[in-house]
């Protein structure tokens, strides 16, 4: 049996609001989902697992029509889905009342339920969110049917943090689930080798979703599960370190950022720039001036001023500045102390004029 496990597609989300590429990203989220469905068809996948948050919010009927149409194009694939904390089942949610295609099975119950796929001799267990938060560890109460150990038992889950159904993947696997297909955490992660995994968001949804995104391709043969992560997203948030030194100026830094982005030559990247290294002690970079130099979502300045402490002590002998530097000389080399020294010196030197 071949399956795809996807999660957190967040259809309808518009990432990076206010940026010029926001609408493009919104369209790419839909587009990647369509491509995924084409891939399901091309690879003749038996089962498509959607582990919650297919939509970014409450789905409109026309959005469900769109999605259902896509599901009708893969009639030989069983689609099993649950509602997550973003698209949770509000009282008037269209999820339950929508006339889904025959191959689509929603586990819409608040308490756990399961579907049985006869052709695949597979049980899929799960539940849907009825509120934004669930603090109870609901998955630990779900037990796979031990009377049918020869069948495949899959848990479809969403959550894993304190406010969204905390869970222990190891305990679930020990209960007898062959595979635990999880959503909610946007970073893809194999929690237990071949047995429990977060597919991660199909496309990164915001600037915190750093790195590769895609879905999980799996195969179950004679009770043996094999999974692999497949990068599939059209966009990626990439951290880019830009080295600064004491000679770097506002203009030269701008040129360096522009050149580095050009050399990287990545159409899919949305940049998170980190300025690193030692800047001249009197230099302050106005990072907002570089924001238009590419698809840049954020520039953070991690540079440190290059103070010559010996020279400063000499120059300000007998003053508070000398005393201040002296006070830190015996202090443990902790980041917090370095910061205090840096900020304190900066404040004192600044007021000196
Ligand atoms: Mn979620």
Image (spheres, rainbow, N blue to C red):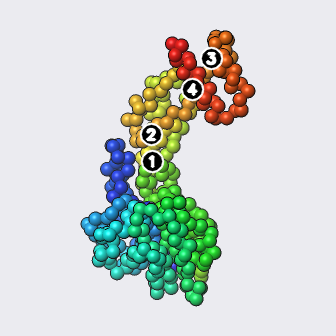
Mark with earlier residue (4, 3): 3
Q: CA distance from mark 1 to mark 2?
A: 9 Å
Cβ atoms under marks 4 and 3 closer than 8 Å: no
Q: Position of residue 176 (x, y in %)?
A: 60, 78
Write down the residue under mark 4.
Answer: 343
* Residue sticking out furthest to the left: 62
> Visible in this render: residue 268?
yes
Instruction: Check the image and report above or below for 11 versus 261.
Output: below
Mark with earlier residue (2, 3): 2
Write down the residue under mark 3.
Answer: 321
Cβ atoms under marks 2 and 4 closer than 8 Å: no
Q: Which secondary structure lies at badge 4?
A: helix
Q: CA distance from mark 1 to mark 3?
A: 40 Å
Instruction: Check the image and report above or below for 264 versus 288.
Output: below
Instruction: Check the image and report above or below for 28 versus 175.
Output: above
Mark with earlier residue (2, 4): 2
Q: Which secondary structure lies at badge 2?
A: strand
Mark with earlier residue (4, 1): 1
Left or right for 98, reference 272: left
Query: What's the residue at 44%, 28% (across, down)?
Result: 286
Give residue 207's mark. Answer: 1
Write down the residue under mark 2.
Answer: 298
Q: CA distance from mark 4 to mark 3?
A: 12 Å
The number of callouts visible is: 4
């Amino acid at each position: 049996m071949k399956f795809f496990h996807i999660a957190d597609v967040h259809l309808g989300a518009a990432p990076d609001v206010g940026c010029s590429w926001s609408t493009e990203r919104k369209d790419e989220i839909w587009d990647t989902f369509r491509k995924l469905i084409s891939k399901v068809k091309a690879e003749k996948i038996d089962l498509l697992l959607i582990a919650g948050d297919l939509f970014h919010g409450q789905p409109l009927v026309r959005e469900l029509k769109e999605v259902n149409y896509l599901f009708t194009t893969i009639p030989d694939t069983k689609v099993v889905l649950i509602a997550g904390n973003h698209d949770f089942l509000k009282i008037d949610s269209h999820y339950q009342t929508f006339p889904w295609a025959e191959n689509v099975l929603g586990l819409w119950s608040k308490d756990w339920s399961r579907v049985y796929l006869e052709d695949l001799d597979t049980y899929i267990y799960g539940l849907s969110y009825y509120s934004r938060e669930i603090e109870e560890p609901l998955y630990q109460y779900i037990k796979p049917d031990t009377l049918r150990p020869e069948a495949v038992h899959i848990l479809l889950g969403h959550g894993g943090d304190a406010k969204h159904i905390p869970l222990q993947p190891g305990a679930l696997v020990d209960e007898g689930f062959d595979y635990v297909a999880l959503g909610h955490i946007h970073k893809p992660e194999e929690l237990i080798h071949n047995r429990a995994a977060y597919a991660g968001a199909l496309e990164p949804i915001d600037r915190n979703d750093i790195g590769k995104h895609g879905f999980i391709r799996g195969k179950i043969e004679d009770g043996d599960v094999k999974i692999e992560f497949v990068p599939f997203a059209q966009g990626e948030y990439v951290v880019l370190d830009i080295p600064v030194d004491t000679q770097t100026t506002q203009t030269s830094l701008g040129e360096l950022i522009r050149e580095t982005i050009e050399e990287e030559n990545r159409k899919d990247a949305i940049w998170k720039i980190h300025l690193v290294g030692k800047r001249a002690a009197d230099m302050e970079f106005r990072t907002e001036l570089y924001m238009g130099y590419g698809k840049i979502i954020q520039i953070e300045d991690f540079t440190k001023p290059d103070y010559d402490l010996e020279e400063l002590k000499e120059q300000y002998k007998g003053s508070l500045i000398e005393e201040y530097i002296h006070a830190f000389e015996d202090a443990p080399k902790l980041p917090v102390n370095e910061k205090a020294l840096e900020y304190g010196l900066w404040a004192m030197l600044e007021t000196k004029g």
